[in-house]
Every structure is written in C-alpha cells, then in structure tokens.
Image (cartoon, rainbow, N blue to C red):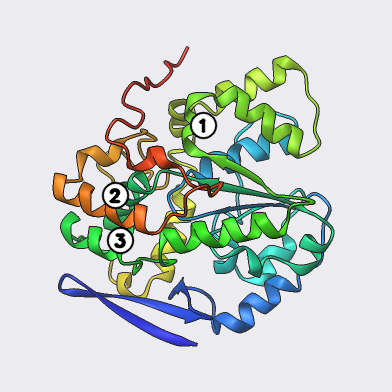
Amino acid sequence: MEILRIPVGDKTLSHKVFEGNKFPDICPGNVADHLEKIRNMAYRHDDVFIMSYPRSGTHWLREIVFMLMKGRAEYIIDDNIDFPIELLDMDTIEKEASPRIFYSHMPFQYLPRDHLARNGKVIGCVRNPKDVMASAFHYFNNVAFEVEWDTYFNVLLEGNAPYGCWFAWRDQWGRMLEQQREHPPLTITYEDTSRNLEGQVRRISEYLGLSYSDDLIEDITHACKFNNMKLAKTRTKSNMMKRIKDAVQDLETATIEDVNRNRGGHNTVIRKGTVGDWKTLFTTEQKQKFNTVYKNKTLAGSQLDFDGYFEDDFMESYVEPSNP
C-alpha cells in the first residue's frame, strides 16, 4: 500500500493507494486486508449495494432503496452504516440487521464475491461531473479544510481528490456493465431522478423485485422529494459528520461545530440538490478546460457517454418540481 500526499494550497491531502485506486486515509488499517474482508463477506439475500463516485446523489438513492426494502415511506433514523462500506469496520457490518443498504465509492471489483456470484442487487448512481465537482468542493470545505475553488478545481480534474478521478470511476463502471450483460446492475442518473422521481422509484422497485400499490409509490416519492428529505434528514446526518470528525487526523483539534458548519444548515451531506449548480462556480476558462478533458476521455457510442454533460445549455430549461 502506498501513501500519496497531494498539495492542496498550503496544506496536504493524503490518500492510501491500492492497485492504482485512491482511498481516503481514514480507510481502516491496510487497504488490501480490509478490502479482502469485504470481498469475503457472508451473503445475505436482501443486501443492496449502491455504487457511486462521491457527491453523485448516493444518500438520496439510499433513502429511496431503504423505503422500498422496508415497504414504508419512512426515513432511515438509527443508521450505523451511514458511511462507505470500505470505511466501516467489519464488526459494524456484521451486526447490522437486514436488510442492509450499503453504499460505496470504490470500484465494483471489490464488492463481496458471494454477492456478485449470486447476482445480488447492485445499483450505480451517476451524476453530471461538473455538478459533482461543485458539490465536492463545498463538502470538502465543510469536513476537511478550507480551500479556494480554483485550487480544488484542478485537484478534482487531475484525479487527486478522495477516490481519484471521476472518469476512471465512470470507465470501470462501463467495463463492468459490459461484463455483466446477463445480470446487469441498475444504473440511475441524478438528472433522471430529478426530472422524474416517481418514474425512478418505480424503476428501482422493479429492479429489486418489489411490487407495491400506487399509493405507497406516491408516498415514497413525496418523502424523497429533495427538499422534503433534506428537511427531515438535517439532524439525523449529524452522526455521520461526527464520525468523519473523529476519523480524520487533521481534525483532531476541531470542534463538532467546526465540522458541522454549513452555510445552508448543519447537514453537509445533503446540500442543495440543484441540477446545474456548477454554473455558480465554473469560470468560462474552467468550463472550456473541463469540456476538452471530457471529450478526450469519452468514447463515442459508450452507454455512459452523457454528451449533455458538457453542453452549455444542459438542463437549461429544467425547472425543479415544486413541493406540494
């Protein structure tokens, strides 16, 4: 295992590197040993794994999946596994009651072998990388240390942020879809979920093999409208934030108020949920630089070629649904 230290302004961001993949330095112990324990996990038929690059709508999707698995429009409250599985200790994983809805930012290949062999449920969440970058910048400033946007833009674009490069994550997910054609995982996009939440709730329900009344689907959809969910989850996410504080070595002297500070409230996990928020940060030069990188790193015809992601008018006409 290699320790990689990236200069970020006048501070340093550290990663653990295993098989060319970057993991946060709070990943327990030796990354190789910990991932092997995850890959050897005992199979449970109702386990669900949500895979994403960070800041892609993971927690939103997890709430939807949880409600569908429970058959009730109720939010996750007592949540001991509200952390990427690769950052959880095995005792916590094994003690969690079923159904377990895990999430992860690591490559697909490190998922439990038995879960994959039995075609267990896996859902991937993909989001416009410009919005991912904007969200990651705000999140990093709230849980780690303050950095200027111009600096962190380059850290992200060069693949030096926690979990590495968005393009590398997208490409490994694309390769996995090619390999798993007989029993493919489900791929959800943040933008489709924003446009048609009820349709995506039904699609996820079908993938999970669940059948519910229209009334329950509508109740879950209403509960998972972004603003409704953010209001309900603002306080319950504080446990996750405290665990981050306790784990990050650079924050040993920080107070919980420092960690939980957020210009929009106490919840730094669920922030705005706005499609196109990248436009509040990107300069014209940065937009052009990103578009060039995107086009150079995207193969035409790929099923994960979301060409709208680099169009200037992407989602320009989209209007967020109002909350009834």
Mark 1 or 2, nearer chain start? 1
Mark 3 or 2, nearer chain start? 3
Q: Which residue is mark 3?
A: 157
Disc 1 crowd rating (10 Å Cα; few below 14, some 14-19, many 20+) is few
Q: Which residue is mark 1?
A: 192
Q: Is residue 69 above or below residue 302?
A: above
Q: Which of these two is toward me, 290 or 296?
A: 296
Considering the numbered disc 2 on the image, is that residue within a helix, a strand or a loop? Answer: helix
Q: Which residue is mark 2?
A: 291
Along the horizontal axis of the image, is 188 left or right of 290?
right
Q: Residue at x 52, y 31 (%)?
A: 193
Label 1 to label 2: alpha-carbon separation:
21 Å
> How far from the left and from the top, in percent, is residue 127?
45, 44
Q: Are marks 1 and 2 in contact (CB under 8 Å)?
A: no
Q: Quadrant of residue 179?
A: bottom right
Q: Amino acid at mark 1?
A: Asp
Q: Which of these two is toward me, 51 or 65?
A: 51
Residue 206: assigned label = none
> How far from the left and from the top, in percent, is residue 2?
44, 87
Q: Is residue 320 above or below residue 183?
A: above
